[in-house]
Image (cartoon, helix red, strand yellow):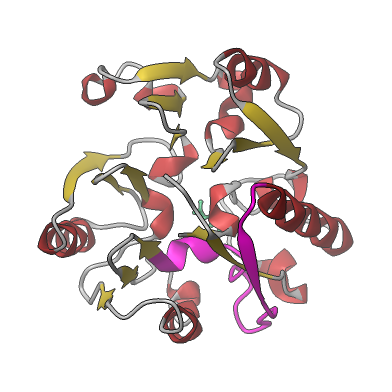
Amino acid sequence: MKFSQTIVRKISKSFVNGLTTVDLGKPDYEKAFEQHSSYVEALKQCGVKVTVLEADERFPDSTFVEDTAILTEKCAIITNPGAESRNGEIIEIQEVLSNFYDEIELILEPGTLDGGDVMQVDNHFYIGLSNRTNEEGARQLKEILEKYDYSATIVPVEKFFHFKTGISYIGDNTLVLAGEFIDKDLFRDFNKIIVNEEEEYAANCIRINDYVIIPKGYEETKKKIVAAGYSVIEVGMSEFVKQDGGLTCLSLRF
Ligand code: CIR
């Protein structure tokens, strides 16, 4: 898939007090700021335009813009984020996306859905059921996608935070995947780049045009992706790991 646009949001000072399920200590704001700047540079290197939204102190997790929308070639779908403290993030995102999209759809109560649970493979979407995405949210998304002639499969997520925490599609019928997804029958027809347990975090990576962006410091996974013929860009993510955030969460791509 060819991407030309991305949207990111600068981290707020309140970022360090955002939601997390891991016990890795508080992120360092300055370092997170630097890492976010490197991420923006990596996106630019992939040849996309980057719209940088200002930090929003009201929402500590608002730098994780991916969770607020699903973007397709035909429509934008504004999600209904499953975490109460994040729900208000969608208001400004909808305004921003109305500059790019004529067709905007909404996930509505009692459905909840986070963008981190949705993986696109060409015209098909996999929708993960996680702590953030419930069955009603997944059902609504599937129905919307089918209206636009896409198809979708709903997949239970057992252990990972979001569906895409453990799986990424990098084009060419190839998945990068870890843990519970490695032996899943649903993915049997894909080429698989398997991420070992110590490097699980690197299963969340992003193919943008001619590059795959991966987190820095995951050498085995890097070797495997390079060996499969991809050009890799590495970005330091240590401060985002502390807040359960992966590479994909930091941008919306379309
Ligand atoms: C949250 O709990 O919502 C944030 N601290 C992390 C969100 C990560 N987003 C993603 O994986 N798509």
Q: Position of residue 143 (x, y in %)?
A: 12, 61
At x 48%, y 79%, the residue is 93
Split into 4 quadrants, where in the image is the C terminus? bottom left
Between residues 17 and 68, which one lies in front from this camera angle?
Answer: 68
Please report the residue visible at 62 percent of the width from the left and 24 percent of the height from the top: 199
Q: Nearer the viewer, residue 191 or 29?
A: 191
Residue located farthest toward the right when viewing the structure as drawn? 30
155 relative position to 15: left or right: left
User: In this picture, is 23 found above or below 148?
Assistant: above
Q: Which residues are magenta?
A: 46-69
Q: In screen coordinates, is 142 left or right of 88?
A: left
- The relative height of residue 216 versus residue 162 in the rendered view (above or below) is above
Q: Is residue 48 magenta?
A: yes
Residue 230, compared with residue 102, is above or below; it is above
The image quadrant of residue 59 is bottom right
Q: Residue at x 54, y 63 (%)?
A: 5
Viewport quadrant of the N terminus: top left
The quarter of the picture where residue 122 lies is top left
Residue at image location 22% in from the left, 68% down from the top: 111
Residue 66 location (% of width, % of height) = 49, 60
